[in-house]
Amino acid sequence: MKLISAGETAANTNNMSVESGEDLVRIGEMAKKYGVTLRTLRFYEDKGLLNPQRDGSTRLYTRRDKARLKLILLGRKVGFSLRDVKQMMDLYDPTGSNTKQLRLALDKSEKQLARLQKQRALIDDAINELSGSMSAVRQMLTERTAPQASVAS
Amino acid sequence: MKLISAGETAANTNNMSVESGEDLVRIGEMAKKYGVTLRTLRFYEDKGLLNPQRDGSTRLYTRRDKARLKLILLGRKVGFSLRDVKQMMDLYDPTGSNTKQLRLALDKSEKQLARLQKQRALIDDAINELSGSMSAVRQMLTERTAPQASVAS
DNA sequence: GGCGCCTTTTACGTTTACGTCAATTCTATA
DNA sequence: TATAGAATTGACGTAAACGTAAAAGGCGCC
């Protein structure tokens, strides 16, 4: 029945283990720390993106998991799918030069960058179109609401 | 039995609403004309956005349907949901001033414009972040490719 | 020693706009 | 008339990333 704090038996406050070696956190703390939900963390694990240790059935996240989570969140931020992120992370090899991983990441990044730029163009289009429509609608409204005089609002 | 060509017959058999030019088209032609699929047209009808006449079971689209479809496509282009589009179109009243409709459209448009601008900002963010990461990755790759010494942490 | 909080697994639900059969009927044309 | 092409309804599938119970087991605390 050991618990989170392998190094702390006497003073068992939540975290802040002075031990620089292992600071294992449970799912709740992990979620709070990175602004995600518990469901998200379990989901990522289910998808093979995270691999926390277990103490019995309780998940214990290491700093390796934290690094991976940071990468996941960065990936999501720039629009990669979880599958892409996984594909890239799966290539990580702590003993090698990771050239393959880097090349894949670069390749995917270029494509994603292209997609983002295309999206931006589409959005700009939409903004322009919408602005134009709004002007027209405003015009119609003022015509209808101010038959005698023009009213500014 | 009878077909699309109601005007071809000497006597107009059934014309409840007086249609001047007989520009009734079936679903295939309609789809081609507006670059959508048959499925899409049926889906829009299912959602209450279109209401083609029927000749037996065959859908016949009038120019009113065409106008509505144009609006739908414009709405989709600027990012409205079909539900929004329907909500706005449902307010259309050929006998009134449509002030309500216009106000709703304007209101929704303002919100949609805000969303679009926010999205653009997010995309710009992502583009910047991604570009930065790509530079870093390129850097790492050149360091690894070069036989010179390198320091990593 | 009861309460409340944390955690677990399982599993269905959500959202949007259609795609993709499948089985069948209707129509046009050779 | 035979057959290819259109059209119909119905219904399940898709994609992404979780949300939301439900039912249960442990833990510390006062």
Image (cartoon, coloured by chain):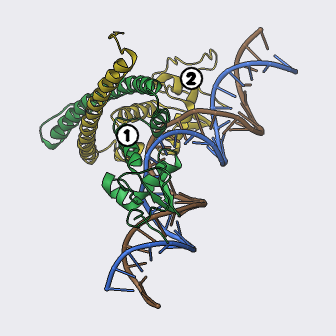
Chain colours: A yellow, B green, C blue, D brown
Q: What element carries label 1?
A: helix
Q: Is residue A53 left or right of residue B65?
A: right
Residue A140 pos. (x, y %): 34, 24
Q: Residue A90 carries which label?
A: none
Residue A64 pos. (x, y %): 43, 33
Q: Mark 2 points at which residue?
A: A7
B128 or C24: nearer the eye? C24
Residue A16 pos. (x, y %): 52, 17
Residue A52 visible in the picture: yes
B3 or B153: nearer the eye? B3
Residue at the image point whose x is 32% and y is 43% from the top: A95
Q: Mark 2 lies on which chain?
A: A
Tag 1: residue type? Leu
- Other-residue count near label 1 (Cα within 10 Å), few / some / many at <14 / 14–19 / ≥20: some
- Between the C-alphas of marks 1 and 2, the distance is 67 Å
Residue A89 drawn above or below residue C23: above
Residue A138 drawn above or below residue A52: above
Residue A51 visible in the picture: no
Quarter containing the C terminus of chain A = top left
Q: In this view, does B120 lie to the left or right of A52?
A: left
